[in-house]
Image (cartoon, rainbow, N blue to C red):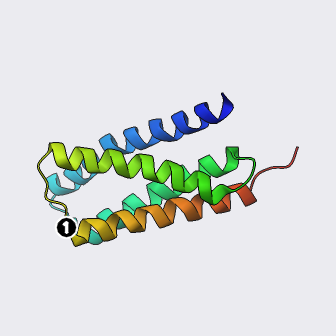
Amino acid sequence: MNTFFKYIKALIIFFCSIILVPLILSIFNLIKLRTNKILIIILGSILMFIIGFLTGKKSLKKGYLNGLFISIICIFILVLISIICRYKLNINSLIYYVILTISTILGSMIGINKKTKN
C-alpha cells in the first residue's frame, strides 16, 4: 500500500505540473517574452526529474525501475492527451518522450542514493 501512495503522490505532482507549466508559459507570452521549444524541453525534464527524485527517495531498491514505471505512466497520460487534442505524434515528440523518460530514471536513481538512512 505504501508503494501505491508513492506513485499517487508523483502523479499528483505530474498533474499539477500539466496545469502550471502551460499557465506559466502563457504568462510569459502575455508579457511578450518568447518561449521556445528548448524552454519547454528543459521545464519538462526538470519536472520529470523532480518526480523521479521523489519517487526514488521513497523506493527501497532498484530506483531505475521505479523511475521507468512512473515515467511510462506519465508519458502514457501525455500521449493520451495528445491524441485527445488531435496532435500528430512524430519523431520530435518521440525524442521528447525519451528525454523525459531518461530524466525521470536519472532522478529516481539519484533519489534512491540520497535517501536518508534511519
Q: Residue at x 59, y 31 (%)?
A: 5
Pick whichever, 27 or 80, lies toward us. Answer: 80
Q: Is residue 50 visible?
A: no
Q: Is residue 47 above or below residue 42?
A: above
Q: Residue at x 52, y 41 (%)?
A: 10
Pick whichever, 57 or 82, lies toward us. Answer: 82
Q: Is residue 77 left or right of residue 9?
A: left
Quarter location, residue 37: bottom left
Residue 118 location, x and y as percent?
88, 43
Q: Is residue 86 left or right of residue 75?
A: left
Number of marks drawn: 1
Q: Is residue 83 visible?
A: yes
* Quarter of the image where the N terminus is located: top right
Residue 115 location, x and y as percent?
76, 52
Q: Is residue 50 above or below residue 99?
A: above
What is the residue that sits farthest to the left in this orientation?
A: 86
Q: Residues within 10 Å of mark 1 (few under 14, many from 20)?
A: few
Q: Residue at x 49, y 66 (%)?
A: 102
Q: In the image, what residue type sits under mark 1?
A: Asn
What is the residue that sits farthest to the right in this orientation?
A: 118
Q: Residue at x 86, y 49 (%)?
A: 117
Residue located beneath label 1 in the image = 90
Q: Is residue 109 left or right of residue 44?
A: right
Quarter location, residue 110: bottom right
Q: Is residue 95 left or right of residue 92?
A: right
Residue 112 location, x and y as percent?
71, 55
Residue 81 location, x and y as percent?
24, 44
Q: Secondary structure at mark 1?
A: loop
